[in-house]
Image (cartoon, helix red, strand yellow):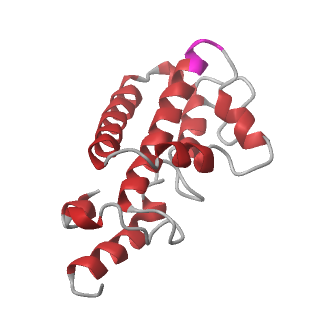
Amino acid sequence: MSALARLPSEYMSTTGIGGGEWSPKDLLGHLALWHEIALRTIDEARDDEEPWIVRVFAGPGPGPNDEELAARAGWSLDRARAAYDESYAAVVSALEALTDEWDAPVKGWSGEPPTLGGLLGVVLGMDRRPFGHAFAHLQELNDFVDAKTEGGD
């Protein structure tokens, strides 16, 4: 999230991204949430359980974003940054450690591919871009940062 390094700290809690409702701090919490879900998914698959997120994806409703982001809204900027940094490092480490598990089927998951790697691609991805979740927010974040750093405010 190199764009955030250019953003003056006074704008980290200013809304204007995520459809206009999120601040950069909220975006950090949002991305941390999906890293945490990926870690939970790996643990549940290793325990031969149907991952919780499979049921969420199959059910109606918006998923965990709204409730979790409301709970994280009161976090300080330091806490949001730490959650993002720690969860990112943990998910990268967990993905690097996957071996045969990557191609293993996952209870309840029938997406393509029907494997742990396939499910993680969805959890950490966006439409037509497995593992590319951050890219779903990148342009909007860059536009926000540009507006705040180039006198566009």
Residue at x-position 35% and y-position 30%: 90
Reply above or below: 14 against 41: below
Q: Which residues are magenta?
A: 44-48
3 and 10: which is toward the camera: 10
Position of the N terminus by quadrant: bottom left
Q: Residue at x 26, y 44 (%)?
A: 78
Q: Quadrant of residue 92?
A: top left
Q: Is residue 146 magenta?
A: no
> Is 92 or 103 nearer to us in this picture?
92
Q: Position of residue 54 (x, y in %)?
A: 70, 34
Q: Residue 147, relative to residue 54: is it above or below?
A: below
Q: Position of residue 55 (x, y in %)?
A: 74, 34
Viewed as shown, does residue 150 lie left or right of 65? left
Which residue is the extreme one toward the right? Answer: 60
- The residue lying at 59 percent from left, 48 percent from top is 65
Asked whether the viewer can see residue 110, the reply is no
In percent of width and height, residue 132 lies at: 46, 53
Q: Main secondary structure of the magenta part?
A: helix
**Residue 120 location (% of width, % of height):** 54, 37
Q: Is residue 71 left or right of residue 108?
A: left
Q: Is residue 25 above or below residue 116?
A: below
Q: Residue furthest front?
A: 74
Does 138 sit above or below residue 41? below
Asked whether residue 88 is in view, the answer is yes
Name the quadrant of the C terminus: bottom left
Quadrant of residue 86 within the rendered picture: top left
Q: Residue at x 21, y 78 (%)?
A: 149
Residue 45 included in the magenta stretch of the image: yes
